[in-house]
C-alpha cells in the first residue's frame, strides 16, 4: 500500500468513528431524557396520592373543629381523600400506559 492509500483509509476511518461518536451521544442523551421524564411522572403520581389524602384529612379536621363532630368528619374526608388519590393514580397510570386520551383526564 502507498502512503496516499493509507492516508485515505485513515481519513475514512476517522469519519466513521466521528459519526459513531455523534450517534452514541445522541442516543445516550435521548435515553437519559426519557429516564428523567419517567422519574418525574412517578414523583407526580406519588405526590398526587399524598396530597389528596392530606387535603381530605385537613378538610375533615377543620370541619370537625368548626362543627364539634370530632372525629367523624375527619374520618369521612380522610377516606374520601384516599379514594380521590387512588383515582388520580389510576388515571395517571392509564394515561402513561396510553389507554386514556390526554383530553379525558378530568
Image (cartoon, rainbow, N blue to C red):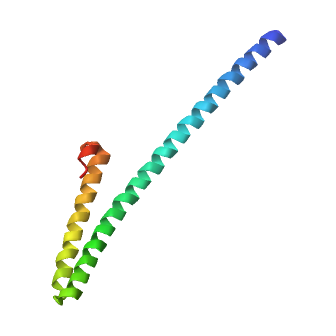
Rendered image quadrant of residue 59: bottom left
The answer to whether residue 55 is left or right of residue 18 is left
The answer to whether residue 38 is left or right of residue 11 is left
Horizontal and vertical percent position of residue 7: 79, 16
| Residue at the front extreme, as displayed | 66
Nearest to the observer: residue 13 or residue 44 = 44
Rendered image quadrant of residue 71: bottom left
Horizontal and vertical percent position of residue 44: 38, 58
Q: Which residue is drawn at 29% across and 72% down?
A: 55
The relative height of residue 7 versus residue 101 in the rendered view (above or below) is above
Nearest to the observer: residue 38 or residue 105 = 105
| Residue at the right extreme, as displayed | 3
The relative height of residue 106 versus residue 48 in the rendered view (above or below) is above
How many discs mark residues in the rendered view? 0
Q: Which residue is drawn at 30% across and 73% down?
A: 54
Q: Residue at x 55, y 41 (%)?
A: 29
Horizontal and vertical percent position of residue 88: 26, 58
Horizontal and vertical percent position of residue 28: 55, 40
The relative height of residue 46 versus residue 92 in the rendered view (above or below) is below
Name the quarter where the N terminus is drawn.
top right
Nearest to the observer: residue 8 or residue 98 = 98
Q: Which residue is drawn at 22% across and 64% down?
A: 84
Amino acid at each position: 500500500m502507498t502512503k496516499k492509500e493509507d492516508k485515505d483509509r485513515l481519513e475514512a476511518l476517522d469519519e466513521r468513528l466521528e459519526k459513531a461518536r455523534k450517534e452514541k451521544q445522541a442516543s445516550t442523551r435521548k435515553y437519559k431524557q426519557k429516564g428523567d421524564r419517567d422519574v418525574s411522572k412517578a414523583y407526580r403520581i406519588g405526590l398526587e396520592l399524598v396530597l389528596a389524602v392530606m387535603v381530605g384529612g385537613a378538610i375533615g379536621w377543620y370541619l370537625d373543629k368548626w362543627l364539634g363532630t370530632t372525629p367523624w368528619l375527619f374520618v369521612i374526608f380522610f377516606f374520601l381523600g384516599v379514594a380521590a388519590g387512588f383515582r388520580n393514580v389510576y388515571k395517571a397510570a392509564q394515561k402513561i400506559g396510553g389507554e386514556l386520551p390526554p383530553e379525558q383526564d378530568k
